[in-house]
Image (cartoon, rainbow, N blue to C red):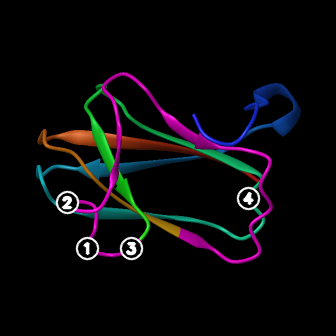
């Protein structure tokens, strides 16, 4: 994961969002809202995830989250919303997003 220690106990209850990703190699997005202190994303079935910060880049200019792993950022204080653009090479996935504000 990225950005220091992920402190799930001190963070309280997260907002849980599930994003259907029914089509492989198709970009989906999730917005991390203002005020977020930490967040975590992963695929429910453990498929490799491709993440980008620019629309249209998740298939070409991205970083990979390996199978059965997650990506997280902690110790942040978003003053503007952040959009993540994601895709997998496997159809029928569900993106799980946990957001602590």
The answer to whether the residue labelled 4 contacts the one labelled 2, judged by CB atoms less than 8 Å apart, is no
- In space, the residues marked 1 and 4 are separated at their CA atoms by 24 Å
Was residue 55 drawn as part of the magenta stretch in this picture? yes
- The residue to which callout 2 is attached is 59
In primary-sequence order, the first of circles 1 and 4 is: 4
The answer to whether the residue labelled 3 contacts the one labelled 1, judged by CB atoms less than 8 Å apart, is yes
Q: Is residue 10 left or right of residue 89?
A: right
- The residue to which callout 4 is attached is 36
- In space, the residues marked 2 and 1 are separated at their CA atoms by 7 Å
The quarter of the picture where the C terminus appears is: bottom right
Dividing the picture into quadrants, the one containing residue 5 is top right
The answer to whether the residue labelled 2 contacts the one labelled 1, judged by CB atoms less than 8 Å apart, is yes
Q: Which mark is residue 56?
A: 1
> What x and y, as percent, mark residue 34?
72, 71
The quarter of the picture where the N terminus appears is: top right
Dividing the picture into quadrants, the one containing residue 44 is top left
How busy is the neighbourhood of tag 4: few (under 14 within 10 Å), some, or many (20 plus)?
A: many
The answer to whether the residue labelled 3 contacts the one labelled 4, judged by CB atoms less than 8 Å apart, is no
Q: What secondary structure is found at the residue carrying circle 3? A: loop
Q: What secondary structure is found at the residue carrying circle 4? A: loop
Q: Nearer the viewer, mark 4 or mark 2?
A: 2
User: Residue at left 69%, top 77%?
Assistant: 80
Q: Nearer the viewer, residue 1 or 38?
A: 1
Q: Is residue 67 left or right of residue 76?
A: left
> What x and y, as percent, mark residue 27?
23, 63
- The residue to which callout 3 is attached is 54
> What x and y, as percent, mark residue 21?
23, 50
User: Residue at left 63%, top 74%?
Assistant: 81
Q: What secondary structure is found at the residue carrying circle 2? A: loop
Q: Nearer the viewer, mark 1 or mark 4?
A: 1
In primary-sequence order, the first of circles 4 and 2 is: 4
């Amino acid at each position: 994961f990225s950005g220091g220690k992920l402190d799930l106990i001190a963070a309280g209850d997260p907002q849980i969002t599930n994003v259907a990703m029914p089509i492989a190699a198709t970009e989906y997005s999730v917005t991390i809202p203002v005020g977020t202190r930490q967040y975590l994303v992963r695929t429910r079935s453990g498929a490799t995830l491709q993440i980008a910060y620019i629309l249209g880049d998740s298939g070409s200019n991205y970083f990979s989250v390996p199978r059965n792993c997650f990506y997280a950022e902690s110790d942040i204080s978003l003053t503007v919303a952040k959009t993540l653009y994601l895709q997998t090479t496997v159809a029928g996935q569900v993106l799980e997003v946990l957001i602590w504000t």
